[in-house]
Image: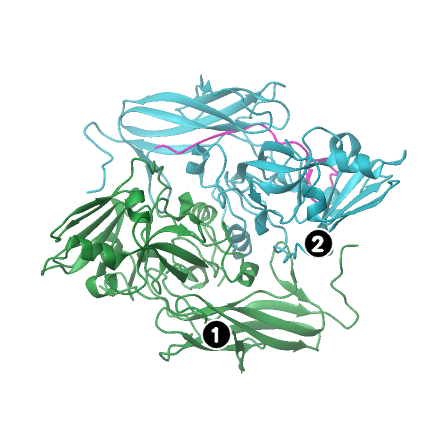
Chain colours: A green, B cyan
Amino acid sequence: MDAAISQDELQLAARNHGLPLEALRYPITPAGLHYLLIHYDIPDVDADRWALSVDGRVAKPLTLTLADLCNRPSHEVTATMECAGNGRALLAPHVVSQPWLLEAVGNANWTGVSLRLILEEAELLDDAMEVVFTGLDRGFEKGVEQTYQRSLELDVALADDVLLAYEMNGAALLPQHGFPLRLVVPGWYGMTNVKWLAGITVVAEPFRGYQHTAAYRYRDDEEDEGTPVTRMQPRALMVPPGIPDFNTRERTVPPGPCVLEGRAWSGWAPVARVEVSTDGGKTWADGLLEPLDSRWGWRGWRYEWTADDPGEYVLSCRAHDEAGNVQPQEATWNVGGYSNNAPQRVLVTVQEPGYHQGAPE
Amino acid sequence: MDAAISQDELQLAARNHGLPLEALRYPITPAGLHYLLIHYDIPDVDADRWALSVDGRVAKPLTLTLADLCNRPSHEVTATMECAGNGRALLAPHVVSQPWLLEAVGNANWTGVSLRLILEEAELLDDAMEVVFTGLDRGFEKGVEQTYQRSLELDVALADDVLLAYEMNGAALLPQHGFPLRLVVPGWYGMTNVKWLAGITVVAEPFRGYQHTAAYRYRDDEEDEGTPVTRMQPRALMVPPGIPDFNTRERTVPPGPCVLEGRAWSGWAPVARVEVSTDGGKTWADGLLEPLDSRWGWRGWRYEWTADDPGEYVLSCRAHDEAGNVQPQEATWNVGGYSNNAPQRVLVTVQEPGYHQGAPE
């Protein structure tokens, strides 16, 4: 649990921003607090020269400017997005890659054009099998030079709410979120949602790109072919209560009533239940769920804890979804360090009676 | 140079966002890419209930709402802000704190009310010596519970361009940048620019708060009383050229002409010169400076490198200011790990003739 992080990994942590967990309090994540995972560099895109090509196994290839896309009917989706590597730095043995603890998540309103609308306009040929999305970001991974590419099988690509998004929270995409256009596939882990989108190519065979065959697979060991990482596993997170220590982030809580609150999500089905533990996972009690106001956005929850006895506590929470998925007590290790959704652990110290978490002196 | 980072430090790195260095390309840092150093948590501020108090050694104490501040004459300043701990993780021996490499910087347009205007309105008493700024963020550091506070001596507080800022880049402050109000003291390191500002207290003696007496001092060892960290030391940074490797961030550059470009700043005086080295600091050549279009904002520079010979190169840059300050070849270690402005080192491999950094396949 306390493996050392190298300077290479620190470089990644410094570039790829996480959600400070107190920002779980905002129903929609404010600009700059949504997590980011940028494989290479943020590309320098001139929107006036940019266009999206749609080609491959289609009857009518298209070239669409940003204005062309904005002039089509728009569609809006609220969606939680999480990196497939969230929780990686809490795995043992240590997995070297972007060292996420638990903060690789955000919830946003995305506006754009339905991908299905564009594919219908291009007229898929009968042998169309997958849709390949190509970004403008380029780099090396394990010696392989590449432009970032991911594909979707046709049934996923044609599903409701899959967007070619040009706005996030009512404003043009920020450069780091894929300006001028990105794919948004609600319910899927972040790697699916190709940023700086430049090309859509319909293909008649399974796509074998690096990000499908080498990365983003659940593999038990290096020899294992594994299975693809797809939708988000269920997870609940809480706003850490009380106030933190600068260096350790451990929390100090005044004695008495303490409302624990947070968000929960699953890519497989709506969140059905959130449980809370105040004894490090030995016993659990149900939290109160907020109304489900969007299928793909996270669901708020709260739990009224009474912190009567001074001392140290480990607070945890875990989500269940309507498909019966639940967070496991222990992480399942895999080579890439994906989908570690073991419950969050928040170490707090409840102070003695008489302690007040003061207003400024 | 490759000290391991603990999980406590990783928690800080995950919370406190840096500027991805390719974002040096933007003259004004876009929302979400400006560096952040949040000592405790982002406070949850209700702007409708918030007010700024101005009290202490003044004849007319004030209580000002956000509307009161916005109704006063506004003043705009473009300012580069850098964390005093930038470069800390490159120091040896290792210093445990927020582990910045080089990315703790940003450049923004700040809009607000002149601090001098407000202090004049409150009428300073004759014995006024310093001005103490109190935020709403609360936590522990080395066992000391505190609300974040910093002070300014009177001559600094009354200087031109010191702002009570309510806008950043033309929009209300984001929560993480101090909404609804923060102090902006152009030229000073970030810790000076108190966020979530709630109180201004004029005092008749030197302020002895934690962030002045325990933190933010240049100290040779634990026994040394040290000297205060104040203005930003000069620094130049470049946009790393070429394309990166995901894990190591090392760069691959095509052979031939390669424009190196970046930004430089100093809190002491305008940037007068930027030098570039392509041999790891053995020899230096002058870069070309962009016009100086603001006193407190960073200054753009470029250098036309011809990467004719394949192989590995270490690229560096260093800034001089008009006061004669220049970046040192080697860092000066101090207990807090402040102001390590030794030159950036960017490792690049120039490829063989015939290599093209392709468009997407």
Is residue A190 shown in magenta? no
Given residues B304 and B276, the one toward you in this image is B304
At label 2, counting other C-alpha atoms closer than 10 Å, the crowd grade (few under 14, some 14-19, many 20 or more) is some
Q: In which quarter of the image is the C terminus of chain A?
A: bottom right
Outermost residue toward the left in this view: A126
Query: Residue A37: image x %, image y %?
Result: 40, 51
Q: Mark 1 points at which residue?
A: A318
Range shown magenta? B215-241
| Res. B11 visible in picture | yes
Does dot 2 land on a helix, a strand or a loop? Answer: loop
Q: Mark 2 points at which residue?
A: B50
Q: Which residue is drawn at 50% across and 40% down?
A: B103
Label ID, residue B174: none
Q: Which chain carries label 2?
A: B
Given residues B159 and A249, the one toward you in this image is B159
At label 1, counting other C-alpha atoms closer than 10 Å, the crowd grade (few under 14, some 14-19, many 20 or more) is many
Q: In which quarter of the image is residue A251?
A: bottom right
Q: In this view, does A123 lie above or below B317?
A: below
Q: Mark 1 lies on which chain?
A: A
Q: Is residue B98 above or below residue B300?
A: below
Report whether A41 appears left or right of A130: right
Query: Residue B349: image x %, image y %?
Result: 31, 32
